[in-house]
Image: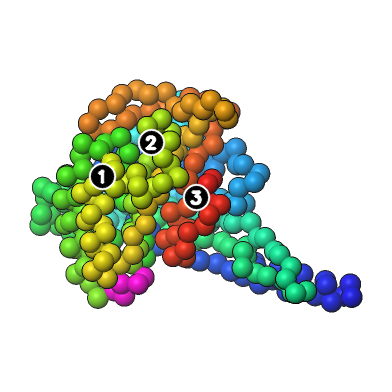
Amino acid sequence: MRDWLTKIQTKAKDLSEAVQSNAVLRVIGDRAAGKTTYMASLARWPNADPSSPVQTVTSINEEGSELVTKAQNILEQGLELEPTRLDASALDVKDYTLSIALKGQFSWKNSQVSLSSQLLTLNISCKDYAGEFFTDLLHQAGNSQLEDYLEDCLQATGIMFLIDGTTYRKDSEYANGLDKFLMAVDRTEMIAAKRRIALVLTKCEQTDLWVNRHQPAYLASARFPQVHRKLQSWQQLGAGNVDYFTTSAFGMLGTRFQEPNSKQLSRSRDGTTSVLKDPKRWRPFGLVAPIYWLCTGDRHKELDKD
């Protein structure tokens, strides 16, 4: 009996360790969206909750290690990251490679091991474009560098469209830029079922966003109705799949009476600028959920809570 049990457990372990999902992602969005801060917080993965489905986040290449260094030397010092520069070609934009391991959970049904929640490794290669990339979609048609960026985006299996959740007054601008981007994306004959776009609302530690963080589709439609309609129409045409997420690179402080773990430097039509308030209690929210969906096509209920 013991030998049988050991064999089953070993087989389950071997199977679970073999499950991997790879994705090539591109991160687009306005200059204020916090794209690099999002990536640096993910790479650092500070003060992980023991109950989180995420086991580890590991940097695989030099660029990924640079993200960790930025998180330690800049974000954890209460400083603001410099914006990503636009002067690099699409080939030269830093390509961050990370490996995200999710914990394996096994259950016993009818004396057999259920592997419905296997240990899963998400291997992502992710380019973080400068904010001007999105702005230039409106004003720089025909620009060769912009065309190169668009062609590079077409090679991705998933697109993360990050929006600062407080920039609702720029809804029409985002919708127009998104329209041009989707037109470019649809030029190829890539299989539609493989193309996914995650709309990710960032900076959701802000109180007016935090209260609705578990209703990302509602929050997106309420704050950015034109963007939401554009994405829904694109999906209904069968061009690809869309889903919605809320995130915070800095997270919250406290349990019963929560407050943002950030010090606000400014807030305007162009977005909210903040720095980390308490590095010792830094715990981001929602960073892995959109990546999981882009990799697998499924929502992970526990990641949506994380």
Which residue occupies 22% across, 56% down?
230
Q: Which of marks 1 and 3 is nearer the N terminus?
A: 1
Q: Which amino acid does label 3 sit on?
A: Asp
Is residue 119 visible to the viewer in this orientation of the structure? Answer: yes
Residue 236 position within the rendered picture, expressed as x and y whole percent measured from the top left: 26, 66
Residue 34 position within the rendered picture, expressed as x and y whole percent measured from the top left: 35, 39
Which residue occupies 34% across, 44% down?
219
Image quadrant containing the C terminus: top right
Query: Label 1 vs label 2: CA separation?
Result: 13 Å
- Whether the magenta-drawn stretch holds residue 6 is answered as no
Q: Name the residue under label 2.
A: 209
Q: Earlier in the sequence, mark 1 or mark 2?
A: 2
Residue 197 is left or right of residue 301, and the answer is left
| Mark sitting on residue 304 | 3
Q: Mark 1 points at which residue?
A: 224
Residue 242 is left or right of residue 168, and the answer is right
Q: Which amino acid does label 2 sit on?
A: Leu
Query: Label 1 vs label 3: CA separation?
Result: 21 Å
Q: Residues within 10 Å of mark 1 (few under 14, many from 20)?
A: many
Span highlighted in magenta in the image = 190-194
Is residue 40 visible to the viewer in this orientation of the structure? Answer: no
Q: Which amino acid does label 1 sit on?
A: Phe
